[in-house]
Amino acid sequence: MSLTIEQRLDAFKRLDEVKLTFAKRDWFPGTSGNLSIKLTDQPLQFAVTASGKDKTKLTPEDYLIVNEDAAPVEPTSLKPSAETLIHAVVYKKIPQAKACFHVHTLGNNLISELYFGQRAFSIQGQELIKGLGIWEENASIAVPIVENFADIPKLAAAIEKVITPDIPGVLIRNHGIYAWGASDFEAKRHLEAFEFLFEYHLRWLQLRHVSLPAT
Ligand SMILES: CSC[C@@H](O)[C@@H](O)C(=O)COP(=O)(O)O
Ligand SMILES: [Zn+2]
């Protein structure tokens, strides 16, 4: 299914906007991170960040269109993200996902290591869980954590095993998080909610033994 120029430009513009927002938060240290927006199903085609680029910058060559095998669908000198297969896995396993964002932050790396033994990070009763679209009273979530592998097909297979539509994200041990949503707006909201919950929990771990004045 061929894409219109308007489809491509709209996706690239949306990716620019979210990329600059995340860049302002220092969420792309050392060229880490990658972003994608789905364009078509049957066949799966999505726009993804080019590999190895400084994601704090906007250039005319930041994105390319790939298929479910992570191969470019148009002639290009750009290399797709080294982790493009992971985005493809998310789009194939979670049909509702229309955008998928990956960042490496200190918060998500620390949480992924602290709780890797449980293969999930659980948190309950935090208002920002609503940012994940979960509005139950005193809701509890468990964010899955997988081992990190340099072999991307192996990492993608590990992720495919654990992701579900219930929790729009997955942590990779000492690496980062993938978060997705039914739009770029929702994927951004989910990622922001995850990162807030990680930071809250880490700060709570630091402060919980502080003696507070008697009330
Ligand atoms: C340079 S450290 C981060 C990379 O190894 C990778 O984990 C990453 O997130 C970015 O890879 P990229 O190929 O630029 O999309
Ligand atoms: Zn990464």
Image: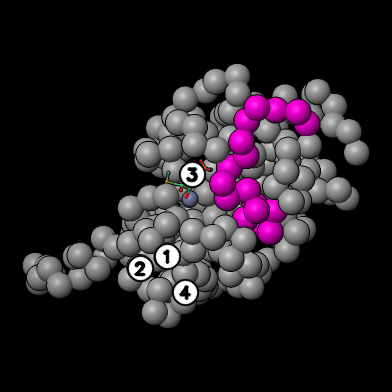
Q: Quadrant of the C terminus?
A: bottom left
Magenta residues (range): 74-90
Alpha carbon of mark 1 to alpha carbon of mark 4: how far? 10 Å
Q: Position of residue 174 (x, y in %)?
A: 38, 61
Alpha carbon of mark 3 to alpha carbon of mark 4: how far? 21 Å
Residue sitting nearer the eye, 121 or 52:
52
Q: Please give the label number shown on residue 33.
A: 3
Kindly report which numbered mark, 4 or 2, lies closer to the viewer in this rendering: 2
Alpha carbon of mark 3 to alpha carbon of mark 1: how far? 15 Å
Mark toward the start of the polypeptide (2 vs 1): 2
Q: Are marks 2 and 1 in contact (CB under 8 Å)?
A: yes
Please, is residue 44 above or below residue 137 in the view? above
Q: Secondary structure at mark 1?
A: loop
Count of numbered circles on the image? 4
Identified at 43% across, 34% down, the residue is 23
Q: Please give the label number shown on residue 120.
A: 4
Q: Please give the label number shown on residue 113.
A: 2
Q: Is mark 3 within 8 Å of ligand 1?
A: yes
Q: Position of residue 207 (x, y in %)?
A: 19, 65
User: Looking at the image, which residue sits at the far bottom?
Assistant: 118
Q: Which residue is mark 1?
A: 173
Residue 10 shows in this picture? no
**Residue flagged by tag 4: what amino acid is it?**
Ala
Alpha carbon of mark 4 to alpha carbon of mark 2: how far? 10 Å
Mark toward the start of the polypeptide (3 vs 4): 3
